[in-house]
Image (cartoon, rainbow, N blue to C red):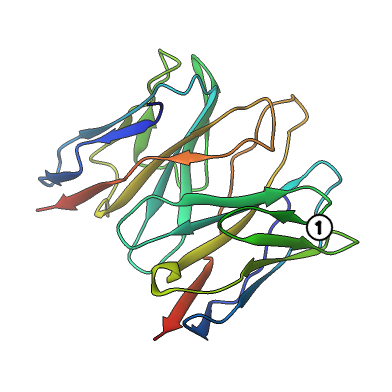
């Protein structure tokens, strides 16, 4: 299964942009890149996902490298509520046409300073 | 509203007992997953199911069992064979037909051995 690599932690100041990197050098052509975030003692929540093109939504932007071997989640103006663990995962279709086991890494712990 | 529901939120288990965590979804999702999360750690996959009456072991299936008799339900049993079951358990679901579909998580269940 294709895996992702993220920094263990990052720190940023409130109201500044945050760029969270993710490396996925073994990504295949059919893998989607998904980002989720998890607040303490809660289940992860969806942030954004993409395949090849950059994506924007109300929460964040996703910048995908041209070779798709890396991506960056961009929070344009961080708030204290954005402090969470951010997970970058790849979703693939297995040979049988169904979803795979959905493996998560440890994610990036984002710390926001007031 | 559609969603995924886990119960109970908190559960205490005596040594040697089996306990079952419930996970129900009304999203018409084919695929369902169980994860274990220890404090400060990432999500580790226990079991997953892509279709009714079928499931696969994840990375840490020993000491756990599951069933998938209905599309909406994917209960997890923590057996007495699981020597260190105290953890936060998360259930998730998604469509198995498209890797671009969002993954939905429950709010989690805290299991403590007393």
Looking at the rendered structure, the secondary structure element under dot 1 is loop
* Position above or below: A84 against A35: below
In the displayed structure, B93 sits above or below B45; it is above
A60 or B82, which is in the foreground?
A60
Q: Looking at the image, which residue sits at the far right?
A: A67
Question: Left or right: where does residue A12 sit relative to residue A95?
Answer: left
Which residue is identified by label 1? A26
Residue B109 position, x and y percent, is: 26, 45
Position of A56 compared to A51: left or right? left
Residue B63 vs residue B114, the one in the foreground: B114
Give the number of marks. 1
Say whether residue A66 is left or right of residue B71. right
Residue A65: x percent and y percent? Answer: 84, 64
The quadrant of the image that shows the C terminus of chain A is bottom left
- Residue at image position (59%, 40%) is A101
For residue A98, say whether it is visible: yes
Which residue is rendered at x = 30% and y = 58% of the image? A41
User: In the rendered image of this protein, does residue A106 appear above or below residue A15?
Assistant: above
Whole-percent x, y for residue A29 in the image: 86, 45
Q: Where A64 sits versus B7, above or below?
A: below
């Amino acid at each position: 299964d294709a895996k992702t690599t993220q920094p263990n932690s990052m720190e940023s100041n409130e109201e500044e942009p945050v760029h969270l990197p993710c490396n996925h050098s073994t990504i295949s052509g059919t893998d989607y890149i998904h980002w989720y975030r998890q607040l303490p003692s809660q289940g992860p929540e969806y942030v954004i996902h993409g395949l090849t093109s950059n994506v924007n939504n109300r929460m964040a932007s996703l910048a995908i490298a041209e070779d798709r071997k890396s991506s960056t989640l961009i929070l344009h103006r961080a708030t204290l509520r954005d402090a969470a663990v951010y997970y970058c995962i790849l979703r693939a279709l297995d040979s049988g046409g169904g979803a795979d086991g959905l493996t998560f890494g440890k994610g990036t712990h984002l710390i926001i300073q007031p | 509203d559609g969603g995924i529901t886990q119960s109970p939120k908190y559960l205490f288990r005596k040594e040697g007992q089996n306990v079952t965590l419930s996970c129900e979804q009304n999203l018409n999702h084919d695929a369902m997953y169980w994860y274990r999360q220890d404090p400060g750690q990432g999500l580790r996959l226990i079991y997953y199911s892509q279709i009714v009456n079928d499931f696969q072991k994840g990375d840490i299936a020993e000491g756990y069992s599951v069933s998938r008799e209905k599309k909406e339900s994917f209960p997890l049993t923590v057996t007495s064979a699981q020597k260190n079951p105290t953890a936060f358990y998360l259930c998730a679901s998604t469509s198995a037909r498209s890797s671009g579909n969002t993954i939905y998580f429950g709010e989690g269940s805290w299991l403590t051995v007393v």
